[in-house]
Image: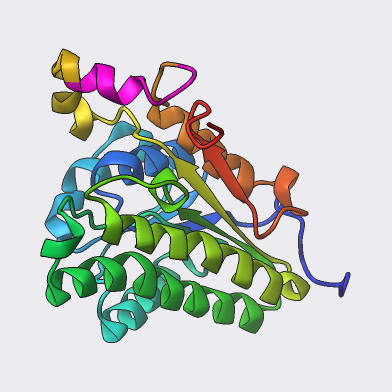
Amino acid sequence: MSENKKTDRTSGPRRALITGASTGLGRDIALAMARAGYNLALTSRDIGRLDEVMAHPDLKDVTAVPIALELKSEDSIEQGFKAAVRGLGGLDVLVNNAARTLLKPAVEVTWEEWDDVVNGNLKGAYFLSCRFARHCMDEDRGGAIINIASTHGMTGFAGRSVYGTSKGGMIQMTRMLGVEWAEQNICVNAIAPTLVLTESRAEMHKDPAQRARMLARIPMGRCPEPSEISDGVLYLAGPGAISITGHTLVIDGGLTVI
């Protein structure tokens, strides 16, 4: 491995592109990275949905750029990436967080639904990662890619076959790209959480029976908080993780162990 590439993540600008940043985990990751001093390019399919997070007090001391991005479109990926680089002067970190879900029996899934989920969750993340890697290579500096996968990509779960397949593909993509770009010091890692207690999931947890069924599958008997995922992102993007690549950090209370 070449040792003359820039790998010191403690110096210079810290600029991150986060997909799906308007709600849920993406929003929480964006706020955590802002508090840590990152300048941010935040994306959503609907740019208007970014208004709330853009106005959040945690972003007041950093540069934040809202970007409309459709991950199923090659042109949108290219134009969105250029807008992020233009707005921040470059990028050092990519967080592939945006995801589409589908809860449906496998025999009822349509071709269109398959394409919507897999193209958005996996194909889009793959080609955005490649665009980010080319940017890092052109700038002759390393970088960090963090893919937000899921325990659904590691275990079986009825009704989630398409979503789980897309996330399993993301975990394997993490391994493949982590090896391929290691010499360029572009670290590619993933985080695979179980169900996270975001605000958007609050209604689910109001049903005691549903909550009990879910927690019964988790040895620790609890779901992770959003901050636990954000802390994982900050670690993998930071100076302590420059020798970690191709790895999936599982945050699931022991779900995938049993």
Q: Is residue 48 above or below residue 257?
A: below
Magenta residues, start to end? 210-220
Q: Which residue is pictured at 69% across the width and 58% down the height?
A: 245
Looking at the rendered structure, the number of numbered marks drawn on it comes to 0
Report whether 168 appears left or right of 158: right
In the current view of this chain or complex, which residue is farthest to the front?
107
Residue at horizontal 51 percent and vertical 59 percent from the top: 171
Residue 27, quarter of the rendered image: top left
Give coordinates of residue 130: x percent, y percent.
51, 78
Q: Can residue 2 be seen here?
A: yes
Q: Is residue 2 left or right of residue 165?
A: right
The x, y position of residue 75, in whole percent, is 28, 86
Does residue 35 appear in this view?
A: no
Q: Residue at x 53, y 68 (%)?
A: 173
Q: Is residue 82 above or below residue 52?
A: below
Q: Is residue 45 magenta?
A: no
Residue that appears at 19% across and 64% down = 45
Where in the figure is residue 107, as x and y percent of width and height? 15, 63
Residue 214 falls inside the magenta stretch: yes
Picture layout, residue 157 above or below residue 201: below
In-front residue for pair 238/10: 238
Q: Position of residue 252 (x, y in %)?
A: 48, 32
Place residue 141 in its image quadrant.
Answer: bottom right
The answer to whether 120 appears left or right of 207 in the picture is right
Is residue 86 left or right of 180 when viewed as pictured?
left
In the rendered view, would you say 226 is above or below 167? above
The quadrant of the rendering that contains the N terminus is bottom right
Report which quarter residue 195 is drawn in.
top left
166 or 95, nearer to the observer:
166
